[in-house]
Amino acid sequence: MNSAQTDRFVHDRLPPRDQWPELRYDTPELQAIPEQVNLVQALFDRAFVNGHADRPFLRSDARTLTYAQARESVNRIVGVLVNERGLVPGNRVLLRGGNSVAMSLAWLAIVKAGLIVVATMPLLRAKELTAIIDKAQPALLLCDDALTAELEATDSGLPMLRFNCDGADSLEALAARQPARAAPCPTSGDDIALLAFTSGTTGVPKAAVHTHRDVLAACECWPRHVLRATPDDIVMGSPPLAFTFGLGGLLIFPMWAGCSVYFPSIPYTPEAMVKLLIAQGATICYTAPTFYRQMAAFAQQQHATQGGVGRLRICVSAGEGLPDATRQLWKQATGIEMLDGIGATEMFHIFISAAPEAVRRGAIGTVVPGYTARVVNADGQDVADGEIGRLAVVGPTGCRYLDDARQTQYVRDGWNFPGDAFTRDADGYYHYQARTDDMIITAGYNVAGPEVESALLSHPAVAECGVIGRPDEDRGQVIVAYVVLKSGHSADAAMVKALQDHAKASMAPYKYPREVVFVERLPRTETGKLQRFALRQST
């Protein structure tokens, strides 16, 4: 296969071949992906062939671009990157910005030009950005004008282009002078499209490498078989485009389906999200379980007075485990059965899920077509149905870290080990237990922290909670719950007992939290994931 990426920096820093995951292309759609393909060109071609050229694609309060207009804008940015800046295929471009039309266009242009996009979370500080720059060695920084301060504080010395702003030297002004046509870089499917830095639940981020083929393969799995979006859908959501959950849900998968995405001009709050969903006629929403829980009260008001939440029909939850209490709360508030899923930055997107009509309470779902999953013990042997083990996954995408010794922890014998503990039932439904490092062994019993969290979340006084194990000489570990109470409830001894009794009433008694610590907030990543390692460090 002929690679077009003359800058071999990333290719040369991939793991040795014997450490790669097995990549399987088991369905006709996956087998049809050509060996020579440019991801962005393929997505635009698909939209045009399906008659979507004049349909809306990227929406905001300020403007709406059709697929044809978006392609023209992308081509002009390609001209800036290649003709004016002289970048060559394989160069890395660090992209920094919040979710916006301009951010989306820049992402698409970088990849169409055969460059490698390194998108970064908007809230990262200079120290964190420096670590990414040192690892990715970008040739150019593309930054939203509102977020330049932390990049400037890195003192990287790298050239920077600003976007989402006026001025003769802005990306927009430079792009306006470029031609509206640009040939796609003739990349192979194995050429690199992006470096996805993990969101840091373990505190030490890694760079997952994904190719043009990886992203197209992901489109042919969960979006085709589970999400099933249509060209009439309007998508909204909170996960950042720098996070693969957000990138897939709010840019790549809508393009593949020919639908449109709305990016708000104001920060999302739970109340604002519900109002915008209705005002914009959104039909698909992506966000994390915590945000759905916070949105529920506002959604219930709309459902009670308006008979629904606008045109909303699909609510996707991912990014962290979905407690059943949150699923039921949202269903009671809106009448909508949530679409749950588990994916990983290393796998690009969701590989276990269930469409709303196939939901089984307490389960995430079944294996997405295109993937194969197992639940195994420490020796890699399959465990019996109902027994807790480690999740192992193989499919058309898989983990390849950039220059990282932790590759062998994630991939073993060709299988990907995302680090999750699961059980599987006789019908093939997978039940999430915890991250493998979040399993608590207390007095000889295995307890999953998220199970205790789900029980506590069903108490009317609890807004949020996080559960960990604290080392203990007598029991090995004791279960500790960090709880954020709703306003109007007292953080006192009576509340501790009430929560412990509530947990005992819904679970085996050995699972109740021996300690309850009341806090004002829980440590979370920018994507909403609970950082249990930070809770463990605080004990």
Image: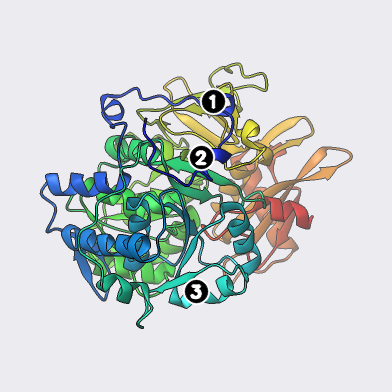
Q: What secondary structure is marked by label 2?
A: helix
Q: Earlier in the sequence, mark 1 or mark 2?
A: 2
Q: Earlier in the sequence, mark 3 or mark 1?
A: 3
The residue lying at 38 percent from left, 75 percent from top is: 266
Please name the amino acid that badge 2 sits on. His
Is any part of residue 309 visible from this angle? Answer: no
- Quadrant in the picture for residue 130: bottom right
Give the labeled residue for mark 3: 147
* Picture layout, residue 64 above or below residue 358: below
Task: Between label 3 and label 2, give the one nearer the viewer.
Answer: 2
Q: What secondary structure is marked by label 1?
A: strand
Q: CA distance from mark 1 to mark 2?
A: 21 Å
The one of 279 and 492 positioned closer to us in this rendering = 279
Give the labeled residue for mark 2: 11
Please name the amino acid that badge 1 sits on. Trp
The one of 529 and 119 positioned closer to us in this rendering = 119
Give the labeled residue for mark 1: 415
Q: CA distance from mark 3 to mark 2?
A: 30 Å
Task: Between label 3 and label 1, give the one nearer the viewer.
Answer: 3
- Does the CB distance between marks 1 and 2 fall below 8 Å? no
